Image (spheres, grey):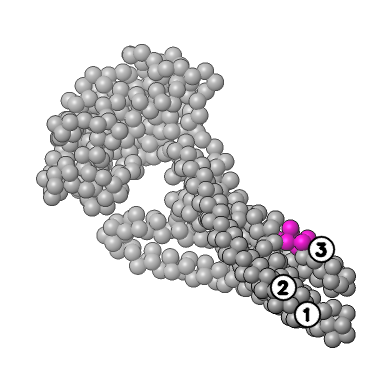
Amino acid sequence: MVGLAVPPYLIARAIDDGLTHGDSTALVLWVAALLGMAVVNAVMGTARHRAMTRIRMAASFQMVRAILKQETRLGAALARRVSSGEVVAVGVADVQTIAQSLTVTGPGIGAVVAYIVVAFLLLSISWVLALVILAGVPLLAFAVGPLLRPLERLSSGYREQQGALTGGLVDMMTGLRVLSGLGGKEAFLDRYRRGSNALREKGYEVGGVTSWIGALAFGLPAIFLAVVTWLSVRMAATHTITTGDLVAVTGYVAMLVVPVASFIEGGTDIARALVSARRVIGFLNLPVDHVDGDDVVGAPAAPAVLRDPVSGVEVHEGRFTALAGARPADGAEIVDRLGRFAQSEATWGDVRLNQVGLTAVRDAILVADNDADIFSGSLREVVAGRHPGSDDQIREALTVAVANDVVDALPDGLDSVVMSNGRNLSGGQRQRLRLARAVHAAPRVLLACEPTSAVDVHTEAAMATRLRAARAGLTTVVTTTSPLVLCQADVVVYLVDGRSAAVGSHQFLLDTEPGYRALVARGAVTEWAR
Protein backbone atom coordinates (compact mmCIF):
# COMPACT_ATOMS: atom_id res chain seq x y z
CA MET A 1 0.00 0.00 0.00
CA VAL A 2 2.83 2.41 0.85
CA GLY A 3 4.52 1.53 -2.43
CA LEU A 4 1.46 2.82 -4.31
CA ALA A 5 1.97 6.27 -2.79
CA VAL A 6 5.57 6.57 -3.99
CA PRO A 7 5.07 6.87 -7.81
CA PRO A 8 3.02 10.13 -7.58
CA TYR A 9 5.83 11.66 -5.50
CA LEU A 10 8.49 10.54 -8.03
CA ILE A 11 6.47 11.90 -10.96
CA ALA A 12 6.13 15.25 -9.16
CA ARG A 13 9.88 15.41 -8.65
CA ALA A 14 10.55 14.52 -12.29
CA ILE A 15 8.27 17.38 -13.41
CA ASP A 16 9.45 20.04 -10.97
CA ASP A 17 13.16 19.15 -10.84
CA GLY A 18 13.57 17.91 -14.41
CA LEU A 19 11.04 19.32 -16.89
CA THR A 20 10.37 22.70 -15.25
CA HIS A 21 14.05 23.53 -14.79
CA GLY A 22 15.22 21.81 -17.98
CA ASP A 23 17.53 19.48 -16.03
CA SER A 24 17.90 16.34 -18.14
CA THR A 25 20.04 14.58 -15.54
CA ALA A 26 17.46 15.05 -12.81
CA LEU A 27 14.70 13.99 -15.20
CA VAL A 28 16.54 10.76 -16.08
CA LEU A 29 17.29 9.99 -12.43
CA TRP A 30 13.69 10.50 -11.30
CA VAL A 31 12.33 8.48 -14.24
CA ALA A 32 14.79 5.67 -13.42
CA ALA A 33 13.62 5.78 -9.80
CA LEU A 34 10.03 5.60 -11.04
CA LEU A 35 10.88 2.55 -13.16
CA GLY A 36 12.62 0.90 -10.21
CA MET A 37 9.61 1.57 -7.99
CA ALA A 38 7.34 0.02 -10.60
CA VAL A 39 9.43 -3.16 -10.44
CA VAL A 40 9.33 -3.12 -6.63
CA ASN A 41 5.54 -2.69 -6.68
CA ALA A 42 5.18 -5.60 -9.11
CA VAL A 43 7.29 -7.87 -6.88
CA MET A 44 5.45 -6.73 -3.75
CA GLY A 45 2.09 -7.27 -5.47
CA THR A 46 3.06 -10.83 -6.33
CA ALA A 47 4.28 -11.47 -2.78
CA ARG A 48 1.07 -9.97 -1.36
CA HIS A 49 -1.05 -12.23 -3.54
CA ARG A 50 0.96 -15.29 -2.50
CA ALA A 51 0.70 -14.34 1.19
CA MET A 52 -3.06 -13.77 1.01
CA THR A 53 -3.55 -17.07 -0.83
CA ARG A 54 -1.49 -18.90 1.78
CA ILE A 55 -3.51 -17.32 4.60
CA ARG A 56 -6.80 -18.33 2.99
CA MET A 57 -5.63 -21.89 2.34
CA ALA A 58 -4.12 -22.33 5.81
CA ALA A 59 -7.28 -21.03 7.44
CA SER A 60 -9.46 -23.26 5.29
CA PHE A 61 -7.46 -26.38 6.11
CA GLN A 62 -7.41 -25.60 9.84
CA MET A 63 -11.18 -25.13 9.90
CA VAL A 64 -11.79 -28.26 7.85
CA ARG A 65 -9.62 -30.25 10.27
CA ALA A 66 -11.60 -28.88 13.22
CA ILE A 67 -14.91 -29.71 11.51
CA LEU A 68 -13.78 -33.24 10.58
CA LYS A 69 -12.58 -33.81 14.15
CA GLN A 70 -15.99 -32.77 15.48
CA GLU A 71 -17.74 -35.00 12.94
CA THR A 72 -15.62 -37.91 14.14
CA ARG A 73 -16.34 -37.15 17.79
CA LEU A 74 -20.08 -36.98 17.10
CA GLY A 75 -19.95 -40.29 15.24
CA ALA A 76 -23.34 -41.84 14.60
CA ALA A 77 -25.03 -38.99 16.49
CA LEU A 78 -24.09 -36.60 13.66
CA ALA A 79 -27.01 -37.62 11.44
CA ARG A 80 -29.44 -36.99 14.32
CA ARG A 81 -28.01 -33.58 15.19
CA VAL A 82 -27.60 -31.91 11.82
CA SER A 83 -28.55 -32.58 8.21
CA SER A 84 -25.99 -33.73 5.66
CA GLY A 85 -26.67 -30.58 3.64
CA GLU A 86 -25.77 -28.39 6.61
CA VAL A 87 -22.52 -30.30 7.08
CA VAL A 88 -21.67 -29.73 3.41
CA ALA A 89 -22.54 -26.02 3.63
CA VAL A 90 -20.49 -25.56 6.82
CA GLY A 91 -17.50 -27.48 5.50
CA VAL A 92 -17.40 -25.76 2.11
CA ALA A 93 -19.24 -22.43 1.78
CA ASP A 94 -18.78 -21.21 5.36
CA VAL A 95 -15.14 -22.21 5.49
CA GLN A 96 -14.39 -20.31 2.28
CA THR A 97 -16.26 -17.22 3.48
CA ILE A 98 -14.39 -17.12 6.78
CA ALA A 99 -11.04 -17.73 5.10
CA GLN A 100 -11.70 -14.86 2.69
CA SER A 101 -12.34 -12.48 5.58
CA LEU A 102 -8.95 -13.23 7.16
CA THR A 103 -7.21 -11.51 4.24
CA VAL A 104 -8.67 -8.20 5.43
CA THR A 105 -5.97 -7.81 8.08
CA GLY A 106 -2.95 -7.32 5.81
CA PRO A 107 -4.50 -4.83 3.36
CA GLY A 108 -6.29 -3.12 6.26
CA ILE A 109 -3.09 -2.40 8.19
CA GLY A 110 -1.34 -1.47 4.95
CA ALA A 111 -4.14 0.96 4.12
CA VAL A 112 -3.80 2.71 7.51
CA VAL A 113 -0.02 3.03 7.16
CA ALA A 114 -0.35 4.30 3.56
CA TYR A 115 -2.97 6.83 4.72
CA ILE A 116 -0.55 8.20 7.34
CA VAL A 117 2.30 8.40 4.81
CA VAL A 118 0.14 10.28 2.31
CA ALA A 119 -0.95 12.64 5.10
CA PHE A 120 2.66 13.71 5.73
CA LEU A 121 3.29 14.09 2.00
CA LEU A 122 0.20 16.27 1.55
CA LEU A 123 1.09 18.48 4.48
CA SER A 124 4.33 19.31 2.70
CA ILE A 125 2.29 20.55 -0.29
CA SER A 126 -0.80 22.27 1.14
CA TRP A 127 -2.48 22.02 4.52
CA VAL A 128 -5.84 22.83 2.90
CA LEU A 129 -5.62 19.86 0.52
CA ALA A 130 -4.29 17.69 3.34
CA LEU A 131 -7.26 18.60 5.53
CA VAL A 132 -9.79 17.96 2.74
CA ILE A 133 -8.31 14.58 1.82
CA LEU A 134 -7.59 13.38 5.34
CA ALA A 135 -11.10 14.27 6.48
CA GLY A 136 -12.84 13.08 3.33
CA VAL A 137 -11.28 9.63 3.00
CA PRO A 138 -12.52 8.29 6.39
CA LEU A 139 -16.01 9.62 5.57
CA LEU A 140 -15.93 7.57 2.37
CA ALA A 141 -14.97 4.45 4.31
CA PHE A 142 -17.75 4.93 6.88
CA ALA A 143 -20.38 5.82 4.29
CA VAL A 144 -21.21 2.16 3.74
CA GLY A 145 -21.48 1.39 7.46
CA PRO A 146 -25.31 1.62 7.57
CA LEU A 147 -25.49 -1.03 4.81
CA LEU A 148 -23.40 -3.65 6.64
CA ARG A 149 -26.04 -4.49 9.25
CA PRO A 150 -28.78 -5.20 6.66
CA LEU A 151 -26.22 -7.23 4.69
CA GLU A 152 -25.43 -9.36 7.75
CA ARG A 153 -29.14 -9.88 8.46
CA LEU A 154 -29.98 -10.85 4.88
CA SER A 155 -26.89 -13.07 4.61
CA SER A 156 -27.99 -14.92 7.75
CA GLY A 157 -31.41 -15.66 6.23
CA TYR A 158 -29.83 -16.67 2.94
CA ARG A 159 -27.45 -18.99 4.75
CA GLU A 160 -30.32 -20.70 6.60
CA GLN A 161 -32.19 -21.36 3.37
CA GLN A 162 -29.03 -22.48 1.61
CA GLY A 163 -28.33 -25.12 4.27
CA ALA A 164 -31.89 -26.45 4.10
CA LEU A 165 -31.86 -26.59 0.29
CA THR A 166 -28.46 -28.30 0.20
CA GLY A 167 -29.77 -30.87 2.67
CA GLY A 168 -32.76 -31.54 0.43
CA LEU A 169 -30.50 -31.97 -2.59
CA VAL A 170 -28.23 -34.43 -0.75
CA ASP A 171 -31.25 -36.41 0.43
CA MET A 172 -32.66 -36.50 -3.09
CA MET A 173 -29.38 -37.67 -4.64
CA THR A 174 -28.90 -40.30 -1.92
CA GLY A 175 -32.40 -41.72 -2.33
CA LEU A 176 -32.79 -41.18 -6.07
CA ARG A 177 -33.20 -44.89 -6.82
CA VAL A 178 -35.88 -45.25 -4.13
CA LEU A 179 -37.67 -42.08 -5.27
CA SER A 180 -37.73 -43.37 -8.84
CA GLY A 181 -39.16 -46.69 -7.71
CA LEU A 182 -41.89 -45.02 -5.65
CA GLY A 183 -42.73 -42.49 -8.33
CA GLY A 184 -41.92 -39.58 -6.03
CA LYS A 185 -39.04 -38.12 -8.02
CA GLU A 186 -41.11 -35.42 -9.72
CA ALA A 187 -42.79 -34.38 -6.46
CA PHE A 188 -39.43 -34.05 -4.75
CA LEU A 189 -38.06 -32.18 -7.76
CA ASP A 190 -40.96 -29.71 -7.64
CA ARG A 191 -40.32 -29.08 -3.96
CA TYR A 192 -36.63 -28.54 -4.64
CA ARG A 193 -37.46 -26.17 -7.50
CA ARG A 194 -39.68 -24.09 -5.21
CA GLY A 195 -36.96 -23.97 -2.58
CA SER A 196 -34.40 -23.03 -5.21
CA ASN A 197 -36.58 -20.17 -6.47
CA ALA A 198 -37.07 -18.90 -2.92
CA LEU A 199 -33.31 -19.04 -2.34
CA ARG A 200 -32.73 -17.16 -5.59
CA GLU A 201 -35.10 -14.39 -4.46
CA LYS A 202 -33.26 -14.18 -1.15
CA GLY A 203 -30.00 -14.03 -3.11
CA TYR A 204 -31.37 -11.08 -5.09
CA GLU A 205 -31.98 -9.26 -1.81
CA VAL A 206 -28.42 -9.94 -0.65
CA GLY A 207 -27.12 -8.95 -4.07
CA GLY A 208 -29.06 -5.69 -3.95
CA VAL A 209 -27.30 -4.57 -0.77
CA THR A 210 -23.97 -5.88 -2.01
CA SER A 211 -24.30 -3.99 -5.29
CA TRP A 212 -24.92 -0.72 -3.42
CA ILE A 213 -21.83 -1.35 -1.32
CA GLY A 214 -19.82 -2.04 -4.47
CA ALA A 215 -21.17 1.08 -6.16
CA LEU A 216 -20.30 3.23 -3.16
CA ALA A 217 -16.86 1.60 -2.86
CA PHE A 218 -15.86 2.80 -6.33
CA GLY A 219 -18.33 5.58 -7.05
CA LEU A 220 -17.76 7.79 -4.00
CA PRO A 221 -13.93 7.78 -4.34
CA ALA A 222 -14.32 8.74 -8.02
CA ILE A 223 -16.52 11.70 -7.09
CA PHE A 224 -14.13 12.65 -4.31
CA LEU A 225 -11.20 12.45 -6.77
CA ALA A 226 -13.01 14.84 -9.11
CA VAL A 227 -13.61 17.33 -6.28
CA VAL A 228 -9.99 17.24 -5.09
CA THR A 229 -8.70 17.50 -8.67
CA TRP A 230 -10.86 20.58 -9.26
CA LEU A 231 -9.61 22.16 -6.04
CA SER A 232 -5.95 21.36 -6.79
CA VAL A 233 -6.24 22.68 -10.35
CA ARG A 234 -7.60 25.98 -9.01
CA MET A 235 -4.67 26.16 -6.58
CA ALA A 236 -2.20 25.40 -9.37
CA ALA A 237 -3.78 28.10 -11.56
CA THR A 238 -3.15 30.66 -8.80
CA HIS A 239 0.40 29.30 -8.33
CA THR A 240 -0.37 28.18 -4.78
CA ILE A 241 1.05 24.77 -5.70
CA THR A 242 3.38 23.72 -8.52
CA THR A 243 2.47 21.65 -11.57
CA GLY A 244 4.36 18.71 -10.08
CA ASP A 245 2.42 19.08 -6.86
CA LEU A 246 -0.83 19.08 -8.87
CA VAL A 247 0.14 15.77 -10.48
CA ALA A 248 1.24 14.37 -7.12
CA VAL A 249 -2.01 15.35 -5.37
CA THR A 250 -4.05 13.77 -8.15
CA GLY A 251 -1.94 10.61 -7.86
CA TYR A 252 -2.30 10.50 -4.08
CA VAL A 253 -6.05 10.79 -4.26
CA ALA A 254 -6.27 8.15 -6.98
CA MET A 255 -4.02 5.89 -4.90
CA LEU A 256 -6.20 6.35 -1.81
CA VAL A 257 -9.09 4.82 -3.76
CA VAL A 258 -7.38 1.44 -3.26
CA PRO A 259 -7.24 1.48 0.58
CA VAL A 260 -10.74 2.94 0.76
CA ALA A 261 -12.06 0.15 -1.45
CA SER A 262 -10.13 -2.36 0.69
CA PHE A 263 -11.80 -1.05 3.84
CA ILE A 264 -15.25 -1.24 2.27
CA GLU A 265 -14.72 -4.69 0.78
CA GLY A 266 -13.21 -5.81 4.07
CA GLY A 267 -16.31 -4.67 5.94
CA THR A 268 -18.48 -6.65 3.52
CA ASP A 269 -16.31 -9.77 3.91
CA ILE A 270 -16.41 -9.51 7.71
CA ALA A 271 -20.21 -9.07 7.74
CA ARG A 272 -20.60 -12.27 5.73
CA ALA A 273 -17.93 -14.10 7.72
CA LEU A 274 -19.72 -13.34 11.00
CA VAL A 275 -22.77 -15.19 9.70
CA SER A 276 -20.65 -18.16 8.61
CA ALA A 277 -18.63 -18.14 11.83
CA ARG A 278 -21.80 -18.46 13.90
CA ARG A 279 -22.76 -21.53 11.87
CA VAL A 280 -19.33 -23.12 12.21
CA ILE A 281 -19.13 -22.39 15.94
CA GLY A 282 -22.65 -23.74 16.40
CA PHE A 283 -21.55 -26.98 14.73
CA LEU A 284 -18.36 -27.21 16.77
CA ASN A 285 -20.38 -26.67 19.97
CA LEU A 286 -22.74 -29.59 19.31
CA PRO A 287 -22.53 -31.76 22.47
CA VAL A 288 -20.93 -35.16 22.12
CA ASP A 289 -22.90 -38.01 23.65
CA HIS A 290 -20.20 -40.60 24.12
CA VAL A 291 -17.79 -38.68 26.35
CA ASP A 292 -15.52 -40.69 28.64
CA GLY A 293 -16.33 -40.56 32.32
CA ASP A 294 -13.97 -39.28 34.98
CA ASP A 295 -12.64 -42.77 35.78
CA VAL A 296 -11.74 -44.55 32.54
CA VAL A 297 -11.26 -48.30 32.83
CA GLY A 298 -10.68 -51.14 30.43
CA ALA A 299 -13.31 -53.52 29.05
CA PRO A 300 -14.50 -55.97 31.74
CA ALA A 301 -13.34 -59.56 31.60
CA ALA A 302 -15.73 -62.19 30.24
CA PRO A 303 -18.34 -63.13 31.15
CA ALA A 304 -19.90 -59.66 31.57
CA VAL A 305 -23.56 -58.80 31.21
CA LEU A 306 -24.45 -55.76 29.12
CA ARG A 307 -27.47 -53.99 30.70
CA ASP A 308 -29.72 -51.16 29.58
CA PRO A 309 -31.65 -49.86 32.64
CA VAL A 310 -34.05 -47.80 30.51
CA SER A 311 -35.50 -50.83 28.71
CA GLY A 312 -34.53 -53.53 31.19
CA VAL A 313 -32.71 -55.48 28.46
CA GLU A 314 -29.85 -57.70 29.61
CA VAL A 315 -27.41 -59.23 27.11
CA HIS A 316 -25.47 -62.23 28.42
CA GLU A 317 -22.01 -63.05 27.16
CA GLY A 318 -21.76 -65.65 24.42
CA ARG A 319 -25.46 -65.75 23.57
CA PHE A 320 -27.40 -64.95 20.42
CA THR A 321 -30.05 -62.46 21.61
CA ALA A 322 -32.92 -61.04 19.56
CA LEU A 323 -34.90 -57.87 20.34
CA ALA A 324 -38.43 -58.00 18.92
CA GLY A 325 -40.86 -55.09 19.13
CA ALA A 326 -43.63 -53.49 17.12
CA ARG A 327 -41.61 -50.29 16.67
CA PRO A 328 -38.19 -50.77 15.00
CA ALA A 329 -37.06 -47.48 16.54
CA ASP A 330 -37.28 -49.02 20.04
CA GLY A 331 -34.72 -51.67 19.18
CA ALA A 332 -32.48 -49.14 17.44
CA GLU A 333 -32.49 -46.88 20.52
CA ILE A 334 -31.53 -49.78 22.77
CA VAL A 335 -28.69 -50.69 20.42
CA ASP A 336 -27.48 -47.06 20.44
CA ARG A 337 -27.40 -47.07 24.23
CA LEU A 338 -25.69 -50.45 24.50
CA GLY A 339 -23.23 -49.44 21.78
CA ARG A 340 -22.56 -46.12 23.53
CA PHE A 341 -23.79 -43.94 20.72
CA ALA A 342 -26.23 -42.17 23.04
CA GLN A 343 -26.21 -40.96 26.62
CA SER A 344 -27.42 -43.71 28.95
CA GLU A 345 -26.99 -45.44 32.28
CA ALA A 346 -25.97 -48.67 30.54
CA THR A 347 -23.57 -50.94 32.42
CA TRP A 348 -21.13 -53.58 31.29
CA GLY A 349 -20.36 -56.04 34.02
CA ASP A 350 -19.88 -54.07 37.23
CA VAL A 351 -19.02 -50.70 35.63
CA ARG A 352 -20.89 -47.98 33.83
CA LEU A 353 -20.40 -48.25 30.08
CA ASN A 354 -19.33 -44.60 29.82
CA GLN A 355 -16.54 -45.28 32.32
CA VAL A 356 -14.93 -47.76 29.94
CA GLY A 357 -12.45 -46.11 27.58
CA LEU A 358 -14.08 -45.27 24.26
CA THR A 359 -11.34 -47.03 22.28
CA ALA A 360 -11.91 -50.18 24.32
CA VAL A 361 -15.67 -49.96 23.72
CA ARG A 362 -15.25 -49.51 19.97
CA ASP A 363 -12.80 -52.42 19.79
CA ALA A 364 -15.13 -54.75 21.69
CA ILE A 365 -18.65 -53.59 20.73
CA LEU A 366 -19.60 -53.13 17.10
CA VAL A 367 -22.92 -51.55 16.06
CA ALA A 368 -23.97 -52.60 12.55
CA ASP A 369 -27.01 -50.83 11.14
CA ASN A 370 -28.40 -50.28 7.67
CA ASP A 371 -27.27 -46.65 7.62
CA ALA A 372 -23.59 -47.50 8.08
CA ASP A 373 -21.49 -45.89 5.36
CA ILE A 374 -19.86 -47.89 2.60
CA PHE A 375 -16.77 -46.08 1.42
CA SER A 376 -15.49 -46.24 -2.11
CA GLY A 377 -12.87 -48.90 -2.74
CA SER A 378 -12.38 -52.48 -3.83
CA LEU A 379 -14.84 -55.10 -2.57
CA ARG A 380 -11.98 -56.58 -0.56
CA GLU A 381 -11.33 -53.23 1.16
CA VAL A 382 -15.04 -52.66 1.83
CA VAL A 383 -15.41 -55.97 3.65
CA ALA A 384 -12.05 -55.81 5.44
CA GLY A 385 -12.56 -52.29 6.76
CA ARG A 386 -9.89 -51.63 9.39
CA HIS A 387 -9.32 -55.37 9.93
CA PRO A 388 -7.15 -56.58 7.01
CA GLY A 389 -7.39 -60.27 6.25
CA SER A 390 -6.61 -62.87 3.63
CA ASP A 391 -8.88 -63.46 0.64
CA ASP A 392 -10.05 -66.68 2.27
CA GLN A 393 -11.13 -64.79 5.38
CA ILE A 394 -12.91 -62.18 3.27
CA ARG A 395 -14.75 -64.88 1.33
CA GLU A 396 -15.65 -66.67 4.55
CA ALA A 397 -17.33 -63.49 5.86
CA LEU A 398 -19.13 -63.05 2.54
CA THR A 399 -20.36 -66.64 2.76
CA VAL A 400 -21.83 -66.01 6.22
CA ALA A 401 -23.68 -63.00 4.81
CA VAL A 402 -24.78 -65.04 1.75
CA ALA A 403 -23.03 -62.46 -0.42
CA ASN A 404 -20.97 -64.69 -2.71
CA ASP A 405 -23.30 -63.74 -5.56
CA VAL A 406 -22.19 -60.12 -5.11
CA VAL A 407 -18.62 -61.17 -5.86
CA ASP A 408 -19.75 -63.24 -8.83
CA ALA A 409 -21.84 -60.39 -10.24
CA LEU A 410 -18.97 -57.91 -10.26
CA PRO A 411 -16.46 -58.05 -13.14
CA ASP A 412 -13.22 -58.23 -11.13
CA GLY A 413 -14.30 -60.27 -8.11
CA LEU A 414 -12.79 -58.99 -4.87
CA ASP A 415 -10.87 -56.37 -6.84
CA SER A 416 -14.07 -54.85 -8.24
CA VAL A 417 -14.68 -51.22 -7.29
CA VAL A 418 -17.61 -50.48 -5.00
CA MET A 419 -18.79 -46.89 -5.37
CA SER A 420 -19.38 -44.57 -2.41
CA ASN A 421 -22.34 -45.78 -0.33
CA GLY A 422 -22.56 -48.77 -2.66
CA ARG A 423 -24.36 -46.84 -5.39
CA ASN A 424 -23.56 -49.58 -7.91
CA LEU A 425 -25.19 -52.24 -5.70
CA SER A 426 -28.79 -53.07 -4.85
CA GLY A 427 -30.25 -52.49 -1.38
CA GLY A 428 -30.02 -56.18 -0.51
CA GLN A 429 -26.41 -56.40 -1.71
CA ARG A 430 -25.43 -53.37 0.40
CA GLN A 431 -27.10 -54.89 3.47
CA ARG A 432 -25.25 -58.18 3.04
CA LEU A 433 -21.91 -56.39 2.53
CA ARG A 434 -22.48 -54.50 5.79
CA LEU A 435 -23.15 -57.77 7.60
CA ALA A 436 -20.10 -59.40 6.00
CA ARG A 437 -17.96 -56.47 7.17
CA ALA A 438 -19.32 -56.85 10.73
CA VAL A 439 -18.75 -60.61 10.74
CA HIS A 440 -15.19 -60.20 9.44
CA ALA A 441 -14.42 -57.72 12.25
CA ALA A 442 -15.27 -60.50 14.75
CA PRO A 443 -16.10 -58.17 17.66
CA ARG A 444 -16.66 -59.46 21.16
CA VAL A 445 -20.19 -57.98 21.00
CA LEU A 446 -22.07 -57.46 17.73
CA LEU A 447 -25.21 -55.31 17.81
CA ALA A 448 -27.03 -55.56 14.46
CA CYS A 449 -30.16 -53.62 13.53
CA GLU A 450 -32.50 -55.43 11.14
CA PRO A 451 -29.60 -57.18 9.31
CA THR A 452 -31.91 -59.20 7.01
CA SER A 453 -34.72 -56.73 6.26
CA ALA A 454 -33.86 -56.22 2.56
CA VAL A 455 -33.45 -59.82 1.39
CA ASP A 456 -35.83 -62.60 0.35
CA VAL A 457 -36.92 -65.33 2.74
CA HIS A 458 -34.57 -68.01 1.41
CA THR A 459 -31.55 -65.71 1.70
CA GLU A 460 -32.70 -64.58 5.12
CA ALA A 461 -32.99 -68.11 6.45
CA ALA A 462 -29.46 -68.89 5.25
CA MET A 463 -28.10 -65.64 6.72
CA ALA A 464 -29.65 -66.32 10.13
CA THR A 465 -28.34 -69.90 10.28
CA ARG A 466 -24.83 -68.97 9.17
CA LEU A 467 -24.65 -65.92 11.44
CA ARG A 468 -25.49 -68.04 14.48
CA ALA A 469 -22.82 -70.58 13.55
CA ALA A 470 -20.17 -67.96 12.77
CA ARG A 471 -20.79 -66.12 16.06
CA ALA A 472 -20.77 -69.23 18.25
CA GLY A 473 -19.17 -68.36 21.60
CA LEU A 474 -19.43 -64.62 20.91
CA THR A 475 -22.16 -62.18 21.91
CA THR A 476 -24.63 -61.23 19.20
CA VAL A 477 -27.72 -59.02 19.41
CA VAL A 478 -30.10 -58.49 16.49
CA THR A 479 -33.26 -56.42 16.26
CA THR A 480 -35.89 -58.18 14.14
CA THR A 481 -39.46 -59.45 13.95
CA SER A 482 -38.66 -62.15 11.39
CA PRO A 483 -39.52 -65.65 12.66
CA LEU A 484 -36.66 -67.00 10.50
CA VAL A 485 -34.16 -65.04 12.60
CA LEU A 486 -36.00 -65.28 15.93
CA CYS A 487 -36.00 -69.08 15.85
CA GLN A 488 -32.18 -69.01 15.70
CA ALA A 489 -31.83 -66.88 18.83
CA ASP A 490 -30.87 -68.34 22.21
CA VAL A 491 -32.89 -65.61 23.93
CA VAL A 492 -35.64 -63.34 22.61
CA VAL A 493 -36.56 -60.10 24.41
CA TYR A 494 -40.11 -59.03 23.62
CA LEU A 495 -40.34 -55.23 23.69
CA VAL A 496 -43.48 -53.24 24.42
CA ASP A 497 -43.19 -49.45 24.25
CA GLY A 498 -39.40 -49.73 24.33
CA ARG A 499 -39.23 -51.87 27.48
CA SER A 500 -38.67 -55.57 28.08
CA ALA A 501 -42.07 -57.22 28.55
CA ALA A 502 -41.01 -60.88 28.39
CA VAL A 503 -37.84 -62.90 27.93
CA GLY A 504 -37.46 -66.47 26.71
CA SER A 505 -36.94 -68.66 23.71
CA HIS A 506 -38.86 -67.98 20.52
CA GLN A 507 -41.10 -70.99 21.07
CA PHE A 508 -41.70 -70.13 24.73
CA LEU A 509 -42.85 -66.61 23.86
CA LEU A 510 -45.09 -67.93 21.09
CA ASP A 511 -46.77 -70.18 23.62
CA THR A 512 -47.10 -67.65 26.46
CA GLU A 513 -47.32 -64.14 24.95
CA PRO A 514 -50.30 -63.33 22.67
CA GLY A 515 -48.82 -59.96 21.76
CA TYR A 516 -45.56 -61.58 20.70
CA ARG A 517 -47.45 -64.20 18.74
CA ALA A 518 -49.36 -61.49 16.85
CA LEU A 519 -46.15 -59.54 16.24
CA VAL A 520 -44.36 -62.55 14.79
CA ALA A 521 -47.39 -63.41 12.67
CA ARG A 522 -47.23 -59.94 11.10
CA GLY A 523 -43.51 -60.44 10.60
CA ALA A 524 -44.16 -63.74 8.86
CA VAL A 525 -46.66 -62.12 6.50
CA THR A 526 -44.08 -59.44 5.70
CA GLU A 527 -41.45 -62.10 5.06
CA TRP A 528 -43.55 -64.01 2.54
CA ALA A 529 -44.58 -60.73 0.87
CA ARG A 530 -40.90 -60.13 0.16
Real-space Cα distance between discs 1 and 2? 9 Å
Residue at 59% over, 59% down: 44
What's drawn in magenta, residue-wise?
Answer: 111-117
| Residue to which mark 3 is pinned | 120
Instruction: Name the disc covering residue 307, or none.
Output: none
Asked which secondary structure carries label 1, the reply is: loop
Residue at coordinates 24% horizontally, 48% vertically from top-left? 418
Q: Quadrant of residue 473 in the image?
A: top left
Query: Which x, y percent locates residue 299?
Result: 39, 18
Q: Residue at x 77, y 65 (%)?
A: 118
Residue 328, image x and y in percent? Answer: 35, 39
Asked whether disc 1 touches disc 2, contact meaning CB atoms under 8 Å apart, the reply is yes
Task: Say which of 43 and 349 sits in front.
Answer: 43
Disc number lying in front (2 or 3): 2
Q: Main secondary structure of the magenta part?
A: helix
> Is residue 381 shown left or right of residue 57?
left
Tell me how far mark 2 sits from mark 3, CA to CA: 24 Å
Q: Which residue is mark 2?
A: 26
Q: Amino acid at mark 3?
A: Phe
- Please identify the quadrant where the N terminus is shown: bottom right
- Crowdedness of circle 1 by 10 Å Cα count: few (<14), some, many (20+)? few
Which residue appears at 81% of the width and 83% of the height?
Answer: 233
Q: What amino acid type should be assigned to the residue bearing mark 2? A: Ala
Q: Earlier in the sequence, mark 2 or mark 3?
A: 2
Quick one: 11 or 403, which is closer to the camera? 11
Is 201 placed above or below 524 here?
Answer: below
Q: Position of residue 107 (x, y in %)?
A: 65, 59
> Hey, what amino acid is under mark 1?
His
Q: Which of the numbered marks, if any, corresponds to residue 21?
A: 1
CA gap between label 3 and label 1 equals: 25 Å
